[in-house]
Image (tube, grey):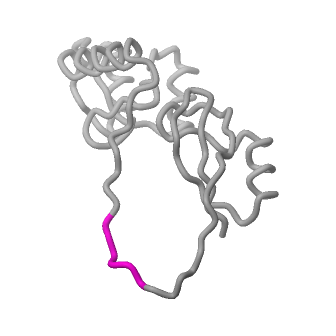
Amino acid sequence: MKVFRLSCAQGHGFEGWFASAEAFDRQCEAGDVACPVCENRVVTRLPSAPYVNTGAREPATVPVAASPQPANPALAAALAALKAHVLAHTEDVGRRFPEVARRIHYGEEDARGIRGRVTPQEAAELVEEGIEAVPLPPGIDLDGKAH
């Protein structure tokens, strides 16, 4: 495995592990490499120092991950406001989302804001029935899990 220092077009640095330099190039061309902070797919390799085996063992250290900084503070603030609004004005129905959304749509339950989880197939079925459901943007984490 090759470990490359990478950077996205927004300047976020991160590392990636690839089978070879050619594998990295192929994955970049296919759009499979994205920044873990902002999901930007314009990624370049940065120069890195070669590994030199001196034979001496250094004490093991636990790396401390830096908190990712938002690429755009205004966007981060807007996403935080959206998250607060969704949490304050919706009920989490979890995996029952398709069932509850249908009951509300057909007047079997009182209208209210709900949030939950659906499979891609369930989402397509809701759209076919004319039931509005909006996915949350990437990075919105309501309960420790990205929706």
Question: Does residue 59 show up magenta in the picture?
Answer: yes
Q: Nearer the viewer, residue 135 or 8?
A: 8
Q: What residue is drawn where x is 29% and y is 20%?
A: 80
Q: Name the outermost residue toward the bottom.
A: 55
Q: Is residue 79 above or below residue 59?
A: above
Left-right relation of 71 to 121 = left
Q: Is residue 16 above or below residue 72?
A: below
Left-right relation of 124 to 105 = right
Q: What residue is drawn where x is 55% and y is 31%?
A: 11
Q: How many discs appear?
A: 0
- Residue 138 is situated, as x and y percent measured from the top left of the image, at 46, 30
Question: Does residue 51 show up magenta in the picture?
Answer: no
Quadrant of res 83? top left
Q: Nearer the viewer, residue 121 or 10?
A: 10
- Residue 112 is situated, as x and y percent measured from the top left of the image, at 24, 14
**What secondary structure is the stretch in magenta mostly built from?**
loop
Q: Nearer the viewer, residue 85 or 102?
A: 85
> Which image quarter is the N terminus in?
bottom right
Q: Is residue 123 above or below residue 31?
A: above
Left-right relation of 53 to 65 = right
- Residue 79 is situated, as x and y percent measured from the top left of the image, at 35, 19
Q: What residue is drawn where x is 37% and y is 17%?
A: 73
Left-right relation of 141 to 138 = left
> Which image quarter is the C terminus in?
top left
Q: What residue is drawn where x is 35% and y is 51%?
A: 65
- Residue 134 is situated, as x and y percent measured from the top left of the image, at 45, 19
Query: Start and end of the magenta stretch?
Result: 57-62
Quadrant of res 110? top left
Q: Name the outermost residue toward the left.
A: 88
